[in-house]
Image (spheres, rainbow, N blue to C red):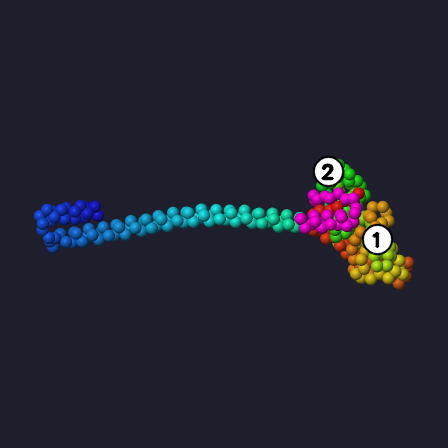
């Protein structure tokens, strides 16, 4: 290719000096040179196009990476905003409950949960350093959660209402019939020792009776879902669904 180019240049130079027109012998060489020159120019343009396209792809990739990073940051900010919003709603409800009940309470956050088949407990971030003691009622705006069974400097363990070892003196709000509520292996609880002659119905609201010295009187507990009355005996039993959704708990109030 180089030889052809040199030969073509030499012939064209001689023709320019002599003033002669291209001959039959020189024309093919010149045409061949022009064709080769054209091919070279096209090749250079294609290489430039490929190179520019490569550079554009690199820039587009970098920009795409930057946009993805920015999008992830915005998603994280939005997630934090939603979490703060939900937390604000929960805390506002607890504050409203505190004002309405006029009870002395200590707010606490849940550190961990244990809902094994043997024990159903919570660990909260308030303890004896915050005047929390054993056998204090733990509540939310929904109702009673349980009672403290152990308190250290900065943490306390709470026995849930649904634990088999839990028992609370309660009464039917509608007719004031009294009984003892105990936990069960499921999320529901049982009410024992309800007088047989008492008119207990499904849907009745159950509240604390105030007996026992742990839970103040009148706190919401749950609703009757089933009644068991035998053909004999002085008492009837009932099933109760607590108002508190234990799986969704994040903050609680400890009653002093």
Residue 151, quarter of picture? top right
> Percent from the top left, x then y, of residue 41?
26, 50
Q: Which mark is residue 55?
A: none
Q: Residue at x 21, y 46 (%)?
A: 2
Q: Is residue 99 magenta?
A: yes
Q: Taking the image as drawn, is residue 68 in sight?
A: yes
Q: Kindly identify the residue that appears in the image at 79 percent across and 47 percent down.
A: 102
**Front residue (pair 25, 135):** 135
Measured from the top left, where is residue 121 in percent x and y? 75, 46
Q: Residue furthest bottom?
A: 231
| Alpha-carbon span between mark 1 and mark 2 | 31 Å
* Element class at badge 2: loop
Residue 117 visible at all: no
- Decide which of tag 1 and tag 2 comes sooner along the chain: 2
Q: Position of residue 6 (x, y in %)?
A: 17, 45
Could you say whether the residue bearing mark 1 is in a helix, strand or loop? strand
Instruction: Report crowding for label 2: few under 14, some 14 to 19, many 20 or more residues within 10 A (C-alpha).
Output: few
Residue hosting label 1: 170
Residue 187 versus residue 198: which sits nearer the camera? 198
Position of residue 130 in the picture relative to residue 88 (left or right): right
Say the numbered circle drawn on residue 154.
2
Image: magenta residue range: 88-115
Assess whether mark 2 and mark 1 are in contact (beta carbons under 8 angstroms).
no
Residue 8 lies left or right of residue 147; in this view the side is left
Q: Is residue 125 magenta?
A: no
How many residues crowd around disc 1 within 10 Å: few (fewer than 14), some, or many (20 or more)? Answer: many
The location of residue 190, given as percent across then percent down, is 81, 55
Q: Which residue is drawn at the image coordinates 16% and 47% (left, top)?
A: 9
- Quarter occupied by residue 256: top right
Tell me the residue at 86%/57% (across/down).
176
């Amino acid at each position: 290719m180089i030889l052809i180019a040199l030969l073509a240049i030499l012939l064209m130079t001689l023709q320019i000096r002599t003033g002669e027109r291209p001959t039959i012998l020189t024309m093919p060489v010149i045409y061949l040179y022009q064709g080769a020159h054209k091919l070279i120019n096209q090749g250079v343009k294609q290489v430039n196009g490929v190179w520019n396209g490569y550079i554009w792809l690199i820039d587009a990739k970098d920009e795409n990476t930057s946009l993805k990073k920015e999008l992830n940051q915005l998603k994280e900010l939005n997630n934090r905003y939603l979490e703060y919003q939900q937390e604000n709603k929960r805390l506002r409800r607890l504050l409203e409950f505190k004002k309405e009940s006029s009870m002395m309470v200590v707010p606490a956050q849940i550190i961990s949960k244990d809902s094994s088949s043997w024990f159903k407990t919570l660990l909260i971030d308030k303890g004896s350093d915050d005047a929390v003691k054993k056998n204090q009622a733990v509540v939310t705006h929904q109702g009673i959660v349980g009672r403290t069974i152990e308190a250290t400097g900065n943490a306390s363990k709470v026995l849930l209402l649904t634990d088999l070892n839990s028992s609370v003196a309660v009464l039917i709000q509608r007719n004031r019939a009294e009984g003892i509520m105990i936990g069960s292996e499921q999320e529901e609880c049982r009410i024992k020792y309800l007088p047989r002659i008492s008119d207990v119905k499904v849907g009745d609201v159950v509240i604390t009776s105030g007996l026992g010295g742990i839970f103040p009187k009148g706190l919401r507990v749950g609703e009757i879902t089933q009644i068991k009355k035998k053909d004999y005996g002085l008492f009837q039993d009932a099933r109760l669904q607590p108002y508190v959704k234990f799986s969704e708990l994040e903050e609680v109030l400890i009653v002093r």
